[in-house]
Image (cartoon, rainbow, N blue to C red):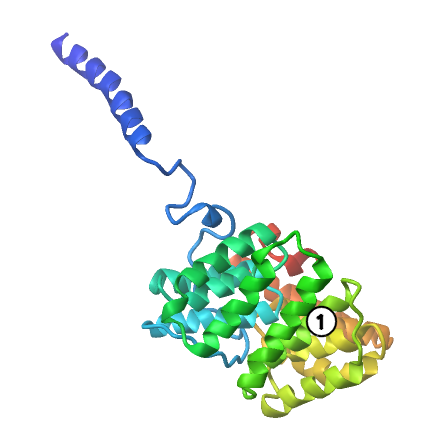
Amino acid sequence: MKRLLCLLSTSLVLPLGAQETTEKNETPAGHSYHGEVFNEGPRQAAVLIPGTGEVHLEVTTKSEEARKFFAQGVGQLHGYWFFEAERSFRQAAKLDPEAAMFYWGMAMANFKNDTRGKNFIDEAVERKAQASEREKLWIDGLAAYFKDPKTDAKKRLRDYVRSLEKILEKYPDEVEAEAFLLHQVFYNSGKDLPVSSHYAMNLLAEKILARYPRHPANHFQIHLWDGTDPSKALKAAANCGPAAPGIAHMWHMPGHTYSKLQRYTDAVWQQEASARVDHAHMIRYHIVPDQIHNFAH
């Protein structure tokens, strides 16, 4: 009987103790210890994935492993794999929490989410003192974009394009600024800011691809001509998937070009390749379909 009473009393005490611990813990269960902005997005740790693209963006960090995750995240941004890009940047920040550009990357992965994007870029600004002058231009441009979401949307987009141009004015060799500029100009065209010259933007694409034929910017050249003259993107369509074979969307995009040119067999091949890459990724890393933009797309 004494033993039973002892067990019962212990069972009553434990929940009270657990409750007391919960009350003392300022972070609710299921929330991130790193702040509210981290409550959403990926929770599973990132891994280095083969074939996310050849990118060239310097980053100040004390961790070589973090540098690899950062490069992976930039490649994933170019491939519209935003959820996984955020995961890569978060992994980089775990390895080196004070590297400002890792938070810039998280903000870029949330370019269409003003709240999360601003919170992430604020984290980058807080750490900007340790960044290089080149990195500060990247951070300042994105911080200005997210500063006041209530500002006229077209002005924000135009100003962001200008911030990328400023990087190139000071660092004309910054190929990733060229790539993001190319992307931003055609992205803005979907926001009632038409491309003023497809030929001028195509010269920029050709400049990038002359240096790095397998750069993920092949993806952006396809988008540039998708609504006007897809035949001008045939070379990019051939190179897009091989440029980042680990990203399914990079196999999907050439299907746009081939379909519009009535090369349906080629288009089907691209979509099958895209699906195979998505399926392999989901199986290998235990990812569910709703976390992959390309799967439904």
Residue at 58% over, 68% down = 77
Q: Position of residue 61 (x, y in %)?
A: 36, 72
Vertical comparison of 190 with 135: above or below: above
**Direction from residue 233 to residue 118 in the image, left or right:** left
Residue carrying label 1: 253
The quadrant in which residue 75 appears is: bottom right
Vertical comparison of 241 with 278: above or below: below
Residue at 34% over, 36% down = 26
Disc 1 on helix, strand or loop? loop
- Tell which residue pokes out farthest to the top in this image: 1
The quadrant in which residue 242 appears is: bottom right
**How many C-alpha atoms fall within 10 Å of the one at disc 1: few (<14), some, or many (≥20)?**
many
Q: Is residue 117 visible?
A: yes
Q: Is residue 286 visible?
A: no
Question: Which of 246 and 177 lies nearest the eye of the viewer?
Answer: 177
- In which quadrant is the C terminus drawn? bottom right
**Three-letter code for the amino acid on which mark 1 is drawn:** Met
Residue at 82% over, 78% down = 230
Residue at 80% over, 63% down = 192
Question: Which of 172 and 35 lies nearest the eye of the viewer?
Answer: 172
Vertical comparison of 275 with 36: above or below: below
